[in-house]
Image (tube, helix red, strand yellow):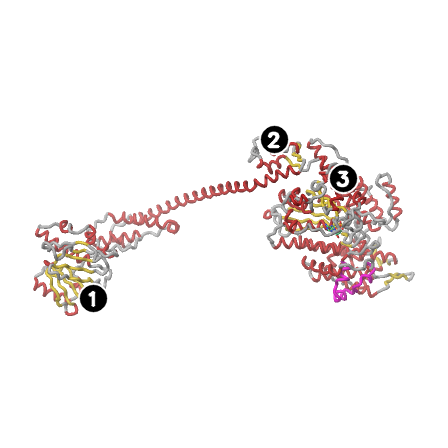
Amino acid sequence: MAELESLEFGKSDFILLDEVTMEQFMENLKLRFEKGRIYTFIGEVVVSVNPYQHMDIYGKDSIEAYRGRELYENPPHLFSVSDAAYKAMKRRAKDTCIVISGESGAGKTEASKYIMQYIAAITNPALREEVESVKHVLLKSTCVLEAFGNAKTNRNDNSSRFGKYMDINFNFNGDPTGGHINNYLLEKSRVVQQQPGERNFHSFYQLLRGGSDDVLKSLHLDNDPALYTYTRQGATSNNDRSSHKAVLHALQVIGFTEEEIHSIYETLAAILLLGNLEFVCDGESVSLSEPLALTEISALTQTDPECVRTSLLYRTVATGGGDVIQKEHSQQDACFGRDAFAKALYERLFAWIVGRINSVIEVKNYNPVLHGKNTVIGVLDIYGFEIFDNNSFEQFCINYCNEKLQHLFIELILQQEQEEYEREGIVWEHVDYVDNQIIVDLVEQPHKGIISVLDEACLTVGNVTDTVLLQSLDQKLSQHPHYTPKGKDLNPNYNLLFQDFKRLMFSSCNGVLRQMWPDGQTSITEVTKRPQTAATLFKNSIVALVQKLACKEPYYVRCIKPNELKSPVLFDDARCRHQVAYLGLLENVMVRRAGFAYRQPYERFLQRYKMTCEYTWPNHLMPTDQEAVRAIVSQHGFDADVDYGRSKLFVRSPRSLFSLEQERNQLIPILVLFLQKVWRGALARMRCRRMRAIYCIMRCYKRYKVKAHFWEVERRFANVRNMADYGRSVQWPEPPAALCRFHRNTVNLYKRWWARQMVKNIPPSDMLEVRAKVAAYSALSGERKDWGVRRAWERDYLSNTCSSFVQVSKELRNKDDFSRVLFSGFCRKINRFNKSTDRALLITDKCVYKLEPKKQFKVLKRTPLQTVTGLSVTSGADQLVALHCSSQDDVLLCLQRGLLSPNQDRVGELVGSLVDQFTRRHLQKGRQTHEQIFSHFSCEEEETFIHEQRLQQSTSRRHITEPDRGRQPAAEGSPKCGSGAK
Ligand SMILES: Nc1ncnc2c1ncn2[C@@H]1O[C@H](COP(=O)(O)OP(=O)(O)OP(=O)(O)O)[C@@H](O)[C@H]1O
């Protein structure tokens, strides 16, 4: 930025001139032009001088340098004004427009192209397809419009012969969503006649030079423009061939179909062939000299050849009596009709092309609710003042248009500004400026203006000559200070295209042509209302355009043409001075300099900059907004640079504003963070409140559901009398699904608690009842855990299953005289090599027997019970039992689980039986109590005896053994047990 500024020459803003005089202005303009500084500011207005050479200031780097920057951050450029217009549109959602004015060749069209390119480049780099397509079509449309609407003139090789106003629509995001092109007054007279040294529209030459042989053949054309009357002049070629390709490509990109493109070529060819038609008069009637051309025209326009001939030679007229007759043309009328037809064909073709482009780029599916306010940037590139030696009706219209635009400029920039100062009570030195209202009135005033007089004259054309028209003008306007009668050829005002041609074109089999001539469907008898004249049509369109511009925030580019020779080094002082004068640039500088660069209502100023001052952020406590604004201004120390109006603040220098903007930009990220923080907090609090409410509702609902559930349970259990019912008939009512989903655990807890309440009071006097109780609990609680661990001990398992054992048992009872069997069951003997064999064990109140089950329970070992001194068991699932004997011949066996009840653990049973036996014996002898016996066992071991299930569940092996086995003989009948790791 500093680097760029140091490269500046002269004053980059005319406001900074030491003295506002024409001399200083011109000196600065010339210096800057010579140093290649073609742009200079007047406030927000950009003055541009055509460099007539390539300038390396429009590339990507430049675009980036200007993107999003303030006007005065960078040297003056078209991009600064484009960015300002874009920013105003985006920030304040205001419609803006960029008005580019200047005379022909001053560089308006080039400027408009750079502006469009800039806007396209800075919008939406995220390449969304629809946005890209809009931009693409908008850029490509320029190429097409130039081909059909531009021509080489003596002042400009690529002169726009029509006015163009392009609206670009944007969504709230600032992305282009579409556009619309308005075209104004195409110089159609150029189709049939051009000034010496000029050419027809580019499109004709491009087709003839660039069209392939096949295409030209199908169009009945030759490739030499000199062969056609309308293009004979300026037939020398430049780059028509390459332009033809570019235009064809642009048409295809925009979306013209092959048929449409061919129809365009057919129309151009028909116009060229029409121009070659000659009429001969044999004294009585007029005829065509070249009937072949007629056939070709009818083929190209897809109309009946005879109809084409009659349209060219006759005119259909409705008589007063309602009859329709054919009136033959004079030779002159026929030539006039032919040219009028050719001009109209081209004009309608051009209008159709513009309409077709509009149909592609128009905003589609725009929903203001979804997409926000649709804003617009308008770019106006319209012909500048034209003064030739021989001026025609078109020059009249063009100059009138420029007067209107100049008036708008005066109104917006000069007049309104001064009026505003007065309204706001700002002390102000009035600046005189030339108000062209009087000239605008001279042209457009109703009844008295030139256009009105012209229209009246056209009503009676044929009977009234141009001389009579001029007399009428003289008569009405001779007193006007700006009226000097000069011209005499105003015929083009009369839009005299014979109706026959319109009907002819509407009868065409070519759909595109028919679309161009919708008014051809009116029958001759219906034509009652006279069409509006060209001048009135033009006036109306320009008035509408000015209204459109006036309601937008305007930005101006004032183009100056430095010389007539298109030279990059010549600065024609007189020419430039003339342009500066009629563009009112000096007055513009005076108003700007005397005035204020920036103004804004206090409220809006405050809204934008309140964060830059501690007294105004977030809200001020002062009595008025004006005082709050004063606080901001004095805090930043530019009191001398501002003035306070009634409702607005006026800032003289943009730099003050710039410093404010800079500070604001620095603060914005901090504020954004702060607001995000506050907002996130608010959101979290909201969410938290909502969640709390949800949980509260859920809690209440669940509580209600659970209660309702237990009420139902109570109701069902109320009638239960029989204990067995708990296990059999009474079913727990299914809890509600919602409850299960949300609170299964709660339900289960409640169930278990309830089940315990229900079974608690049942006395465990009987095993059956215990079982029923357990079953009831299971049914009630839904807990499927195995509670039935307290099965009944059978003790004598072998007697219950094996008859041969019963026999052996009887024999042994007789022999050893035992009174009862303490325990019997299958077991396995394990030797030291870990080999096992089936055995049976019988313990009576006298002896322990080891039997061989495979040999009819033959007694293998008999150990008197008295000799048993201790007992060891393992806690594992192997049910290993060791009966320690005083003879040191221990019985070591693994008790087998029953085949029918594999989960039965019999160690507890064996131990219980032995304990029972010894207890009884001691009780009988009265020597030892139950506690005394168990005092030999640790608590853990006691539990081992009582809760045999623990033995099953425990994974670690526990050993109960006699600690001093073999060394300290135990007292009779009192086994000593201990524990220790094996
Ligand atoms: N910024 C520029 N850089 C380089 N050359 C330029 C620039 N502006 C204009 N020119 C040259 O000047 C010529 C005329 O410019 P342009 O066609 O934009 O004028 P105009 O004001 O639109 O004229 P008209 O009113 O006749 O259409 C261009 O063809 C180009 O050669």
Q: In which quarter of the image is the C terminus?
A: bottom left
Residue 538 appears left or right of 133: right
Measured in 3D between alpha carbons, the distance from the residue under mark 2 to the one under mark 3, in whole angstroms, is: 40 Å
Q: What stretch is highlighted in magenta?
A: 203-230
Measured in 3D between alpha carbons, the distance from the residue under mark 1 to the one under mark 2, in whole angstroms, is: 110 Å
- Which comes before the other along the chain, label 1 or label 2? 2
The reply to whether residue 498 is in sight is: no
461, 691: nearer the viewer: 691
Residue 96 appears left or right of 804: right
Q: Where is residue 90 in the image (x, y as percent from the top left)?
A: 63, 45
Q: Given this view, does label 1 or label 2 mark the residue nearer the observer?
A: 1
Q: Given this view, does label 2 or label 3 mark the residue nearer the observer?
A: 3
Callout 2: helix, strand or loop?
helix
Callout 1: helix, strand or loop?
loop
- Quarter of the image holding residue 587? top right
Q: Given this view, does label 3 or label 1 mark the residue nearer the observer?
A: 3
Q: How many labels does the image show?
A: 3
Identify the residue at the far bottom of this view: 855
Which disc, if any, is residue 24? Answer: 3
Whether the magenta-drawn stretch holds residue 220 is answered as yes
Identify the residue at the far top of this view: 623
Amino acid, disc 2: Glu
Amino acid, disc 1: Phe
Amino acid, disc 3: Gln
Residue picked out by circle 2: 627
Q: How crowded is mark 1: few (under 14 residues within 10 Å), some or many (20 or more)?
A: few
Q: Where is residue 656 in the image (x, y as percent from the top left)?
A: 64, 37
Residue picked out by circle 1: 833
Give the answer, above or below, for where 212 lies relative to 41.
Answer: below
Whether disc 1's CB lies below 8 Å from ligand 1 is answered no
Whether the magenta-drawn stretch holds residue 27 is answered as no
